[in-house]
Image (cartoon, helix red, strand yellow):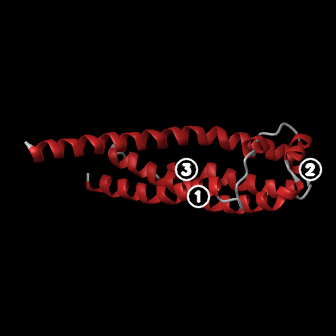
């Protein structure tokens, strides 16, 4: 159980830069891109190009570079989450399971490189970009659900423990 407590704290520590990145993505005008999901899920290059505004190119580039920090952070969170779950369930940690934690980050990195190529007008990469975006999100959605479940469990479990502590303290 001592290992689990360590990984719970590590999980919260690794969550902090993700929250900071998300706040920066939403509040910093230098990197805020309001229509990023529409851009990412463009059906063709003409639609992609239509969503890209000329004076918006610098912001898109900064957002893309900043996204690498976010990618490293969420990949770390996936790894710590896997360790936390495995330790809590007393499963043996196998190295190949960590490869699954790296796949969304690798796809996101590839997506970012392709995105920069598309911003430079290299249209031949669009079909590859199209599929990389969809594969990345297809893999990210289950990971996000797992992270939300861990976070909810953490809040409920520690709220219960804190309530039990308060009850014992004041009785």
Image mark count: 3
Query: Residue 51: x percent and y percent?
Result: 85, 45
**Residue for point 86% across, 53% down:** 118
Mark 1, residue position: 21
Instruction: Check residue 67 in the rendering and tell me which mark sits there, or answer none.
Output: none
**Residue to which mark 3 is pinned:** 101
Residue 154, position as x, y percentages in the image: 36, 44
Q: Position of residue 61 (x, y in %)?
A: 78, 61
Viewed as shown, does residue 32 lie left or right of 101? right
> For this view, does 124 lie left or right of residue 135?
right
The residue wearing badge 2 is 123
Give the mark nearest the N terminus, 3 or 2.
Answer: 3
Residue at x 39%, y 45% (from the top left corner): 85
Q: Earlier in the sequence, mark 1 or mark 3?
A: 1
Q: Residue reaching furthest left?
A: 171
* 17 shown above or below 107: below
């Amino acid at each position: 159980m001592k290992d689990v407590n360590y990984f719970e704290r590590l999980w919260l520590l690794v969550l902090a830069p993700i929250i900071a990145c998300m706040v920066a993505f939403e509040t910093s005008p230098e990197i805020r891109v309001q229509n990023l999901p529409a851009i990412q899920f463009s059906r063709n290059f003409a639609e992609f190009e239509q969503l890209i505004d000329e004076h918006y190119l610098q912001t898109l580039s900064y957002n893309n570079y900043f996204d690498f920090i976010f990618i490293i952070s969420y990949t770390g969170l996936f790894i710590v989450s896997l360790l936390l779950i495995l330790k809590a369930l007393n499963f043996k940690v196998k190295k190949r399971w960590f490869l699954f934690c790296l796949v969304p980050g690798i796809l996101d990195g590839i997506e970012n490189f392709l995105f920069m190529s598309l911003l430079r007008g290299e249209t031949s990469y669009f079909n590859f970009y199209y599929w990389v975006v969809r594969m990345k999100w297809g893999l990210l959605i289950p990971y996000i659900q797992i992270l939300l479940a861990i976070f909810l469990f953490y809040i409920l479990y520690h709220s219960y423990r804190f309530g039990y502590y308060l009850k014992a303290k004041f009785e």
